[in-house]
Amino acid sequence: MKYLLTYDFMESMRVTNQWLGSTARAMCSYPQLGLIANPAIQMTAAWGEVMERSFARMVVKPDWNIHSIAGDDGRDHSVIVETVVTRPFGDLIRFKVQGRAPTGRKVLLVAPMSGHYATLLRSTVISLLPDCDVYITDWHNARDIPVSAGKFDIEDYTLYLVDFLREMGPDSHVIAVCQPAPLALAATAYLAEEDPAAQPRSLTLIGGPVDPDAAATDVTDFGNRITMGQLERHMLQRVGFKYAGAGRMVYPGLQQLSSFMAMNADKHSKAFTDQILRVAKGDASDHDKHNKFYDEYLAVMDMTAEFYLSTVERIFKELEIAQNRFTVAGKLVDIGKITTVAVKTVEGGKDDISAPGQCVAALDLCTGLPASKKASYIEPEAGHYGIFAGKSWRNNIRPLVLDFIDANCDVPKTPIKDMAAE
């Protein structure tokens, strides 16, 4: 019961802070207060506006907000987000571009389940849509999934990817971003033995912890330092009474967010201080750079306890993927069985979450794959987010990934658009 109450206490604190922000904003926005020459009033109203918006975003799943793209025919083509496969813990969705012929590049973008929604990859989707038929894994918030739906751990995650690839059929290509990189590798190896016809043509792994011990970071140090008992005692709680998943044991999104913010506390503190000043001076806007980033960054989701614990124990502590000892439903998944799927790794030279060396380790595990089917790339100046979003992704990494896809598929393809020129 204490876990239920603790979860509800966190939500109560969030609501309280949202209320404090809205109250400060409303009280300090009365026109009569404009007669008082005191900048503290404007600053308090600005603080309230930023506070209210920030805490309100924490429980809202962001929209994709992808409505259309420009086509080669000079027309805007509407984009429809349609659900292809529905599962309790996550769906396979497709961004269907109306009135456009197939591009020849059917891409499954595997989104991380690490505290944020799949919409964290919105800019990645937008950058791929002109050249690819894009599908993505849309993971659900664990707080909204009834206990009756059962468990969801890294083996279930892997089998979800297997099912999604089977649904997409042949001639598909996988791009796995961050956390799912080792599990996407395992899902491909699983298909190599169980259903070779459903294997993707290529697999691109971006900044993922295939071998966490290959290069130490704060994340890997934490995983090695803390015990599983400590994680269970201090990180897990039961979903409160307000949600459909009441009673489910989870790693709460709000608790994850506090960890994210603590990793770069000075940077976030300065960002919010600067935004309050901009609001007070009237220089901020609803969709400015700060709001665009933090509306997404602050929107967090709960993770099932079993997924969190199995990730830490089996990926980071036991190194089951790194040592090719990963099992699914009691069956060993041999990564060496991958013999036809081209594998490329992408890393950021300044990635402080999955440091260079962790992801490229996947190539050594693919012992059955010829060297001609392997590739790797390091973007020297990119951090963790830069390798799948921003200028480094658009101008340098994206063209290389699309060229890699084209080199490993015989399906006729449309010409690649140059994002740097737009």
Image (cartoon, rainbow, N blue to C red):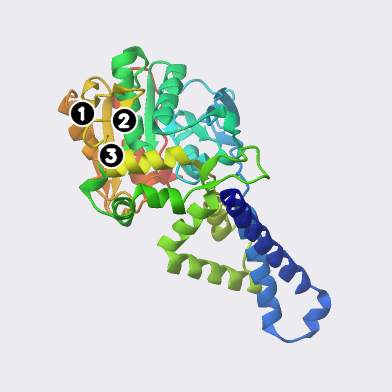
Residue in the image at 70% along x and 67% along y: 20
User: Alpha carbon of mark 1 to alpha carbon of mark 3: how far?
Assistant: 12 Å
Specify the label residue 185 is tagged with. 2
Q: Residues within 10 Å of mark 2 (few under 14, many from 20)?
A: many
Q: Check if mark 2's residue and mark 3's residue have beta carbons within 8 Å.
A: yes
Residue that numbered label 1 is attached to = 366
Q: Quadrant of residue 381?
A: bottom left
Q: Give the residue furthest to the right.
A: 32
SS label for mark 1: loop
Residue 203, given in percent of the width and then of the height, sits at 32, 29
Residue in the image at 65% along x and 63% along y: 17
45 vs 393, left or right, is right
Looking at marks 2 and 3 on the same chain, the residue that comes earlier in the sequence is marked by: 2
Looking at marks 1 and 3 on the same chain, the residue that comes earlier in the sequence is marked by: 3
Along the line of sight, which residue is nearer the eye, 287 or 260?
260
Specify the label residue 406 is tagged with. none
Q: Which amino acid does the dot numbered 3 rest on?
A: Val
Residue in the image at 50% along x and 42% along y: 303
User: Alpha carbon of mark 1 to alpha carbon of mark 2: how far?
Assistant: 9 Å
Residue 409 in view in this figure = no
Q: Quadrant of residue 15?
A: bottom right
Q: Which amino acid does the dot numbered 1 rest on?
A: Cys
Residue 60, given in percent of the width and then of the height, sits at 63, 47
Rendered view: 106 above or below 35: above
Q: Check if mark 1's residue and mark 2's residue have beta carbons within 8 Å.
A: no
Q: Which amino acid does the dot numbered 2 rest on?
A: Leu
Q: Check if mark 1's residue and mark 3's residue have beta carbons within 8 Å.
A: no
